[in-house]
Amino acid sequence: MTSHAMRDAWYPVGLLSGLSEGGKDSLLLGENITVFGSATGAPSVECSGRTLPVVRRFGHLWTSLGTPDKDLFTIPEADHPERVRVDVGVVRVKCSPLRAVENFLDIAHFPFVHTDILGAESHPEVSEYKVEIRDEVDEVWATKVEFFQPQAARSAGGGITTEYMYRVPAPTCAVLYKTCPPRPGAWDVIALFVQPLTEDLCDVWPWMALFDDESALTDLIHFQQLIFLQDRSILENQIPKRLPLDPAKETPTRADLTSVAYRRWLKRHNFTYGAQLVAG
């Protein structure tokens, strides 16, 4: 059974560019929904005979099974006219939607899962960084994260020490700000929007807003898809399947600080769909 907090959250359910007027059946938090496109540009979502609220943002359609008490979060960088906005598409993953987000927040796996791209086995160290739950905006943030990467982005010409910031603005969404190789001092933005189909199955919609005047759009999409497909094999074999929220399961090492804060934030708000609530 889903909590009110989870039902009242916003979730991605499709790319605006791929919606069909005839409708497409899907799932959200275990419930059947149908997503409709429209020739007039007014898409809709239906569930059990009722029309759900919708928001169009970041090239995606978002909806909620409940009554959201606030608007969908924003990413100010998404509106910058010089940025390339990349709709990467969707990847279905047999894992908890919360596991998908936590994996996105995990830095330590870079050298071993994304070897010679986002990390190198010769540089596995995770330096000290800052993690906080910002109560004024009710978001988890990790800042001052630095990591050596052989190829930090499609636009990178060689290995660099990349600076990261992580932001969790919603239970199944995370936003990454990282060093922009062709534009020093600016941030590339990579987001992960997760649609929880069931507690053990999700659709993951990566999205990017980049400064990159040279790479072809298909190359940017393929690069990000490669990264996430490397993650998928790990996600689908994690044990336990659901994300443990019991404090006894937390291991607050330096590399795990963002995960620990994310789990505490989920538990604080009763965001528990896809979670394991007791040790075992």
Image: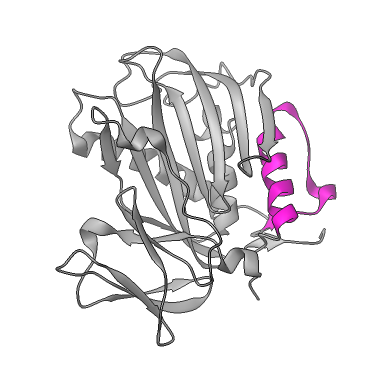
How many marks the image carries: the answer is: 0
Point out the residue furthest to the bottom here: 49
- Residue depicted at 29% across the width and 22% down the height: 155
The colour mode here is: one colour
Taking the image as shown, residue 128 lies to the left or right of residue 54, namely right
- Residue depicted at 48% across the width and 44% down the height: 231
Q: Does 78 appear above or below 187?
A: below
Q: Nearer the viewer, residue 70 or 155?
A: 70
Taking the image as shown, residue 36 lies to the left or right of residue 116, namely left
- Residue depicted at 23% across the width and 27% down the height: 82
Q: Quadrant of the N terminus?
A: bottom right
Taking the image as shown, residue 25 lies to the left or right of residue 231, namely left
Please indicate, yes or no, whether residue 31 appears anywhere in the rendered image. yes
Q: Nearer the viewer, residue 18 or 226?
A: 18
Q: Give percent across and percent down for residue 56.
A: 33, 56
Q: Which residues are magenta?
A: 243-269
Q: Nearer the viewer, residue 259 or 270?
A: 270
Q: Quadrant of the C terminus?
A: bottom right
**In terms of secondary structure, what is the magenta stretch mainly?**
helix
Please indicate, yes or no, whether residue 244 appears anywhere in the rendered image. no
Q: Does 207 appear above or below 161?
A: below
Q: Give percent across and percent down for residue 194.
A: 47, 55
Q: Does 110 appear above or below 1?
A: above
- Residue depicted at 42% across the width and 18% down the height: 150
Q: Give percent across and percent down for residue 2.
A: 63, 72
Q: Is residue 260 magenta?
A: yes
Q: Is residue 47 magenta?
A: no
Point out the residue furthest to the right here: 248
Residue 278 sits in which quadrant? bottom right
Point out the residue furthest to the left here: 39
Q: Does 115 appear above or below 179?
A: below
